[in-house]
Amino acid sequence: VVASMIVTLLLRDDDTDRFHNKLAVDALDVFSSLTHPKLHEQITSTENLVNGLQRVLSQGSGDGRRVAAQVVRDLARNHVVNQSLFGETEGLLRSLITLIRSGRAEISKKAGAEALQVLVANHADNKKAAASAGAIAPLIDLLNLRRSDATIRAALTALKHLALGSKSNIETIANSGAIAALITVVRSGKEDITRRDAANTLNILTVESTQNVKLIAKSGAEAVDALLRML
């Protein structure tokens, strides 16, 4: 019943629709943050709820889009059925990628990256769909030392999950400038955990790719030493 009421607010389309949309995703955020797979399944099975979330992600206010991304993240985490459901929802992956690329606040970009990392983790179809939708370039753009370490780690984890088990994504990530950006994080990231995450992501990119090994080697002995220290 509560989920049905939330859907009604998500789909409101009047002068105050953004207020009602935000109110609805705030309520969903409370429910989805509870670690209860059955509850998550019940929420997402409510008619039109996923489409309502996609509506907020694509048309909502800045805060509304951020919270909607957090809801997607929480509902899909460790839940293959919900991963598939969100991945198959028309436009949802593209809306998350747009949030990563164009969200005004860094916290919104981070929320988009966190949602994307959950959707592509161990899910071959979502990996392929996200890469095809253009997820890789905006994630690499987040590997900028002006960003917070938390945001950089969210992007690193998303890139790592996109690369794992996908030779084509490994190639695309490497060819999109990720190696130079990752080496910069390994050498100059503020926190050890961030530098280690960057090193692990680089390590994944070298799996069955002698070309990527050569690209890392070309970065110089200092970069290689920094990488080895982190692994």
Image (spheres, grey):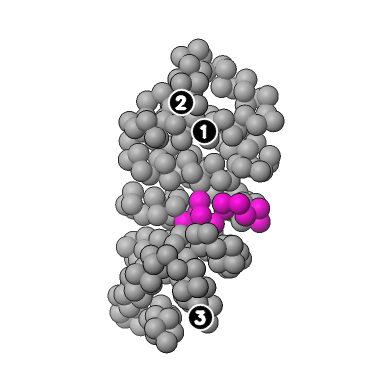
Report if the CB atoms under discs 2 and 1 are less than 8 Å apart.
yes
Tell me where residue 150 sits by quadrant: top left
Which one is earlier in the sequence, the residue at label 2 or at label 1? 1
- What separation in Å lies between label 2 and label 3 (alpha carbons)? 45 Å
Q: Which residue is mark 3?
A: 46
Q: Dot 1, crowdedness within 10 Å: few (<14), some or many (≥20)?
A: some
The amino acid beneath tag 3 is Thr
Question: Which residue sits at x=68%, y=39%?
Answer: 167
Per the picture, the main secondary structure of the magenta-coloured stretch is helix
Q: Dot 3, crowdedness within 10 Å: few (<14), some or many (≥20)?
A: some
Q: Which residue is mark 2?
A: 230
The image shows residue 159 at horizontal and vertical percentages of 53, 42
Q: Dot 2, crowdedness within 10 Å: few (<14), some or many (≥20)?
A: some
Look at the image and give the residue range highlighted in magenta.
115-125
- What separation in Å lies between label 2 and label 1 (alpha carbons)? 8 Å
Q: Is residue 15 above or below residue 201?
A: below
Reply yes or no: does residue 172 show up in magenta.
no
Q: Which residue is mark 1?
A: 200
- What separation in Å lies between label 1 and label 3 (alpha carbons)? 39 Å
Question: Which residue sits at x=58%, y=38%?
Answer: 173
The image shows residue 90 at horizontal and vertical percentages of 58, 67
Residue 90 in view (yes/no): no
Secondary structure at badge 1 equals: helix
Secondary structure at badge 3 equals: loop
